Image (tube, grey):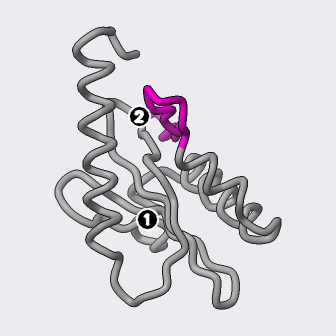
Amino acid sequence: MEKPKFISYTRPNGHNEFEEFYNSLPTKDRNKLRATIDMIEEAGIQAAIQLEWVKKLDSEIYEIRSKISSNIQRALYFHVRNNQYIITHGFTKKTQKTPTKEIIKAKQIKEEFEEEYYATKDFR
């Protein structure tokens, strides 16, 4: 089985919300989040679920989980096909439960991605 590959999505308006979030993080948080993504890509999704590096939020949206002391970072993503995953955006988690507005935002970005790529291109 192929290893998962995560990419972030640049919206038609030119914004890449995950990259903007990632670049705004303090260096330690940024490094931890990058390391978590790298470990998931190396170990695979099933191992990442068992190790609690990722969590399924609903039928379409998952989160990458990163934490340094009290700083909790999340990056939401969805599966495209085969081993390809799109990171929609990231946020700093301040509550116990992932805010519904973040899941809704990820779903909106997913719909936008599907409209743009599946309607006009052969995504590979």
Amino acid type, residue under disc 1 in the picture: Val
In the image: residue 7, left or right of residue 27: left
Asked if residue 60 is positioned above or below residue 15 in the image, the reply reads below
Label 1, secondary structure: give it: strand
The reply to whether discs 1 and 2 touch (Cβ–Cβ < 8 Å) is no
Say which residue label 1 marks. 54
Asked if residue 78 is positioned above or below residue 69 in the image, the reply reads above
**Residue 88 among magenta residues:** no
Amino acid type, residue under disc 2 in the picture: Asn
Say which residue label 2 marks. 83
Residue 85 location, quadrant:
top left
Q: Residue 101 in the image: x percent, y percent?
A: 30, 67
1 or 2: tag closer to the N-terminus: 1
Q: Nearer the viewer, residue 21 or 2?
A: 21
**In whole angstroms, how far apart are the C-alphas of marks 1 and 2?**
15 Å
Asked if residue 1 is positioned above or below residue 36 in the image, the reply reads above
Give the residues in magenta: 1-16
In the image: residue 89, left or right of residue 32: left
- The furthest residue to the top: 121
Q: Residues within 10 Å of mark 1 (few under 14, many from 20)?
A: many
Name the chief secondary structure element in magenta. Answer: loop
**Residue 5 among magenta residues:** yes
